[in-house]
Image (cartoon, rainbow, N blue to C red):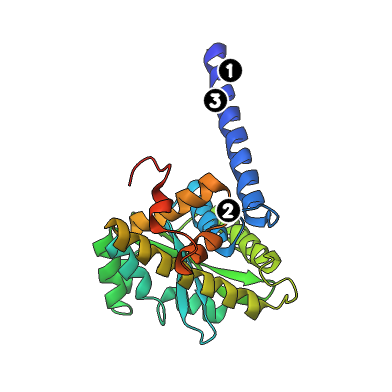
Amino acid sequence: MSEHLSRYDDTAGEASMNRERELAKAFVDLTDTYAPDFDPLRLFDRLVHACRTLLDVDAVAVMIADARGTLRTMAATEDGAAFVELMQMQTGRGPCMDCYRTGRGAAIADIRAESERWPELAEAMAEAGYRSLRTVPVRLHERVLGALTLLTTRTGDLTGADVHLAQALADSAALGLMHWSAEPRRDDVVTRVQGAMAAKTLLEIAKGIIAAHHRVPMSTAGRLLADYADRHRVSLIMTAQALVEHDMEPADICEGAVDV
């Protein structure tokens, strides 16, 4: 009996240490602005994947507001058509927009209960396989930049600990964005957000170039670009810019890739 308890304690202790390492890595990745491959595209991608790894959720997306106050998806853990459509629905209204406007997170424990309030959202979530949603503001001190969306395939809300962790990760990402050095002479929030938006637009153009050249889906093109940047330890923005400005050939992106 004592031997069994000892093994249980060892397993529990190891799991706790692994989680502590994952937590530490997540916060370092979100704030290490001196890393050679750091850019806002990487920042938001790391945020959503850290949330999916560390929280009891099935999918995550982060949306940031542009100068007109319209939300735009900057990164997501899923790239399926149903999920993309689900996010597009919330660019001007919905729980994500409410979170951005009020600066307060909220939970939808069962989307079916909100079918009268948000019929299109309820239908889109059901089609994508999600039952509940939690929003968390992405904020820099008291200024709200956007919203983090956490989805699960079951009903119910996240635990209080998970909500607090999601908020801490979102706040760290906002702080990392402000320390991003693309505009070293400007440190205002608007400049940083506009820079991130421009980078996202550049990436979408580059993905289109790769998709057309290699005849692959946009999601595959995005992974090829990210893999290239990882292999060469360069920023994703620099890679996308080189493609768009014809300083790099689309064929170069697949050199050294495992598969296309």
Label 2 secondary element: loop
Q: Residue furthest bottom?
A: 68
Q: Which amino acid type is shown beneath numbered disc 1?
A: Ser
Q: Which residue is label 3 attached to? A: 11
Q: Residue, x 60% and y 54% (percent of image)?
A: 37
Q: Which residue is label 2 attached to? A: 234
Image quadrant where residue 187 sits: bottom right
Using residue 231 as the reference point, say whether residue 156 is left or right of it: left
Q: Which amino acid type is shown beneath numbered disc 2?
A: Val
Q: Is residue 152 visible?
A: no
Label 3 secondary element: helix
How far from the left and from the top, in percent, is residue 228? 47, 50
Image quadrant where residue 122 sits: bottom left
Mark 1 or 3: in front is: 3
Real-space Cα separation, disc 1 to disc 3, in angstroms: 9 Å
Real-space Cα separation, disc 2 to disc 1, in angstroms: 46 Å
Mark 1 or mark 3: name the one nearer the start of the chain: 1
How far from the left and from the top, in percent, is residue 49? 49, 52
Other residues around mark 2 within 10 Å, as few (<14) / some (14–19) / many (≥20): some
Mark 3 or 2: in front is: 2
- Residue 102, compared with residue 7, is above or below; it is below
Q: Which amino acid type is shown beneath numbered disc 3?
A: Thr
Q: Which residue is label 1 attached to? A: 6
Using residue 91 as the reference point, say whether residue 196 is left or right of it: right
Mark 2 or mark 1: name the one nearer the start of the chain: 1
